[in-house]
Image (cartoon, rainbow, N blue to C red):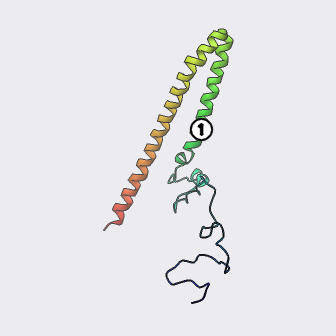
Amino acid sequence: MNPGAQAPGQEYQGYQAPGYAPAAGAGVPQWQGIAGVTPAAARPRGEKGFIGSLFDFSFDSFVTPKIIKVLYVLLTIWTLLLGLFFLIIGFRQGGVGGGIAVLIIVEPIFILLTLGVYRVVLEAFMVIFRIHEDTKKIRERAESQP
């Protein structure tokens, strides 16, 4: 057998010059991605993107599930800005004592309750869309069976 030949049943280990040690990382794919970053999931066949769903006049594809995360981020920013506004009003109208009371008592309650309500409402929308998707899959399975 050849000195550099591959034995039957062995995987290719890359080229190695005779008399040299294997290169660092030999046997490791060279196309590894960035640590902690996963590639975007491929869109299922037939599913439209955001723009396609936006201009789908038959309403077969929905926009809401695609923008729900962005909407929650915007609502969070809006809530924090309102909290800041209330804090400024608290300091202006109530002085230092009123501002600290707003900061310690009113702000956390306002922010937590508001974000909680937003989250529950958005999750309810997502549940409705998931029920629709699951019902659609059940119907497609039932139609495909003889």
Q: In this view, does 9 lie to the left or right of 20?
A: left
Quadrant of the frame with the C terminus: bottom left
Q: Quadrant of the N terminus?
A: bottom right
**Which residue is found at the position 59% from the left and 34% from the top?**
75
Name the kind of residue labelled 1 in the image: Val
Q: Is residue 23 left or right of residue 67?
A: right
**Residue drawn at point x = 62 percent, y = 70 percent:** 26
Residue 38 to residue 8: above or below = above
**Residue 123 in the image, given as x and y percentages of width and height:** 47, 39
Mark 1 highlights which residue? 73
Vertical relation: 74 (above or below) 93: below
Residue 35, percent from left and from top: 61, 54
Horizontal and vertical percent position of residue 6: 56, 83
Q: Residue at x 42, y 49 (%)?
A: 132
Residue 85 lies, in percent from the top left, at 65, 22
Q: Quadrant of residue 142?
A: bottom left
Q: Is residue 121 above or below residue 62?
A: above
Give the vertical position of 55 relative to 3 (above or below).
above
Which residue is the extreme one toward the left? 146
Front-most of residues 106 and 130: 106
Q: Residue furthest front?
A: 19
| Residue located at (63% from left, 59% from top) | 33
* Left or right of 17, for residue 64: left
